[in-house]
Amino acid sequence: MSLLPRTSEEFSSAEYWESFFKKRGEKAFEWYGDYNKLCGVLHKYIKVQDKVLVVGCGNSELSEQLYDVGYKHLTNIDISETVVTHMNQRNAECRPGLTFQQVDATQTPYEDASYGAALDKGTLDAMASEEEGALAKNMLTEVGRVLSVGGRYVCVTLAQESVIKLAVEHFVQLGWAVRLHCLQEESGKEEDSFALPVFVLVCTKFRQPMPKPILEMCLGEDGAPTRLVQVSELLSAVREHQAYSALRKRLRTGTDASSNLSLTLCHTKTGLPRYTLTVQDSSPRTKVPGSKHFAIFIVPQGSETAWIYSSGEGRKQLAASANFRRLVIVAMHRNQEYTDMLAVQSELSPMVMDLAPPGMPANQQVPFLSVGGDLGWREEVSQGVSQMSGQYCVENVKGEDGELYRRLVFLSNAALVQSESRLVSSNTTTSQKKKKNKRKSKSAAAPAISSTSLSVDSGFLCCAHHEIMVAGLALLGVGMPESKDIPLSVLLVGLGGGGLPQFLRDFVPNVSVEVVELDPVVLEVAKEWFGFRPDDRLTVTLGDGLDRICALEKEGAGLFDVIMFDVDNKDSTVGMSCPPAAFVEASILQKVSSLLTPRGIFILNLVCRDSVLRKSVLQRVSDVFPTILSRKIEGEVNEVLLCIGADKETNAIKKKRNSSTCDHSFRKK
């Protein structure tokens, strides 16, 4: 038997509701929540002595229960003759003062300002679908007419966006105060509830219209109101609560190891993101002890971009090693203060049970896990804005290895570290650093060394793909005794923090490096915060890398022994984040080939998640460079392509065989 409308238009049909109540019969229909769920917020806004108009009462028990607790001045109206007759018969003897009338809510016979409150449970939702909302507007106008000054329209609603927008904009234009309560289900009751939460809209009439809108949002019946400025902000808050409610119901009613559900918790006062929670369920094949239902893992500050925390496969491995049915992985955000692990636990604990797996006992203790039992450490040392890349920050972090690192992060993609360098005390030598590596610190406190006394360790490559790019120079015999006096010219597109070109300049004999960088802000950041120092062997050309390649080609062929592309793609809609697609077009690859010397090689950092696109890129590269040596980075999407042209292939492979022991000559020092 179909009891709920099949389409939204049926909600407002008198014929539908007439048929509905005949089918439903005696049983009350409380799909918006019963009295026990609603009484707290209703008693808050409707006084016992108020004269109350109940709009679209249906056969709900709500009016009867309000009458029984002292509300004796209720006028119930409904469009259905069947329900009005039934409700009058049901209450004639036990509640003689409770009346039900067949009245159209858009055309009531009542006098102006004759009621202190109007109560609507789902009627607005029903009417808003008819005549593009015209029926609902007429009903709201009628409610405004019959309410006295100080009177309240209290509407229980599912807050579909078009419905709540219609009502809120209507009363804001009239200068009324608008407050919206979101009533969440109690933990453990999601199995029998709707996925969407119930909202209660409270609109208060003033004698003089308010000059500026009063818009407030409350969580629960007693939650402190959050003041909003625009209707769009209120609608956004509603969507967030609805999405969270649907997520919570999904989590409480099932498990799915293949999904990566996540939500962001924001600071109550500032609205800024504070925590991102990602839910990872164990595989059904994993044997989990019966008592290990659920745990929370706190990612150390500064480690959130690590593969094991940021990738789906990494999180699966983390969950498997923790061996819980469900693991919630918590990342802390930048520009937020966190006192200690106990404070974080206290802050997150009220929400923990909302995310628990189905079947977990209500009194089950939920452990908080972390690396070394601390929160890590992060310090922002600079921030700014690039016209090309947006907001950025430079931060010092403490790695899980106990070392200090400096990072450049563009906030448009805060999960990606643009550049990273290891930090050392300004008076620490490389040899001293090696000795210190043997005794790692386990403290989470901020380092005793001041940021001003820290400097970048230019002899250390943080990025694994940079290690491979440097090791690829062994194809040219770099590192071999017979090659120590042979000059080496390198063109590098993409500066970042300058770690790679400085390493080449400082540790590769007889090298000259030209770096092409599009963003002047990146160059300034590299100089100020990453110790980048150009000289006659390391020059920087500001401009588009493609334009520079075209200009160099006009100067002549065979200018460089090595050309490296290490440049990111700002277009997130493409499944390739490095390089931009234009850099691997056939015409550009041909120009790259012509710029290489007879012994030259092309080295490409490729980051491509789209398998079809990757195959296409590899085909275009191989059309120009017949021999490609590929090395994928473990735990990352990056792969480094060492590309050799047809006329260089035999010689390069011979050198590769002769120098096989030198492949990692320039790995971490």
Image (spheres, rainbow, N blue to C red):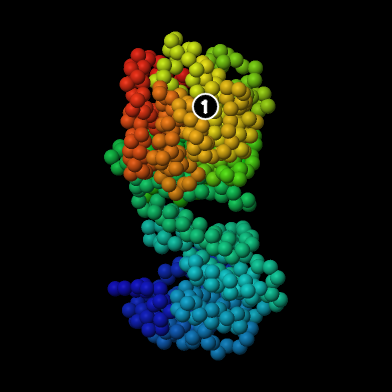
Q: Give x and y (percent) for residue 435.
A: 54, 13
Residue that badge 1 annotates: 500
Displayed quadrant of residue 590: top left
Circle 1: element type: helix
Question: In front here: 500 or 414?
Answer: 500
Quarter placement of the N terminus: bottom left
Residue occupying the far top of the picture: 481
Taking 454 as reference, is 92 above or below it? below
Q: Give x and y (percent) for residue 176.
A: 64, 72
- The amino acid beneath tag 1 is Leu
Q: Give x and y (percent) for residue 130.
A: 45, 78
The residue positioned 35% from the left and 77% from the top of the image is 24
The residue positioned 57% from the left and 25% from the top of the image is 538
Q: In this view, does 295 lie to the left or right of 457?
A: left
Q: In this view, does 380 lie to the left or right of 353?
A: right
Taking 462 as reference, is 225 above or below it? below
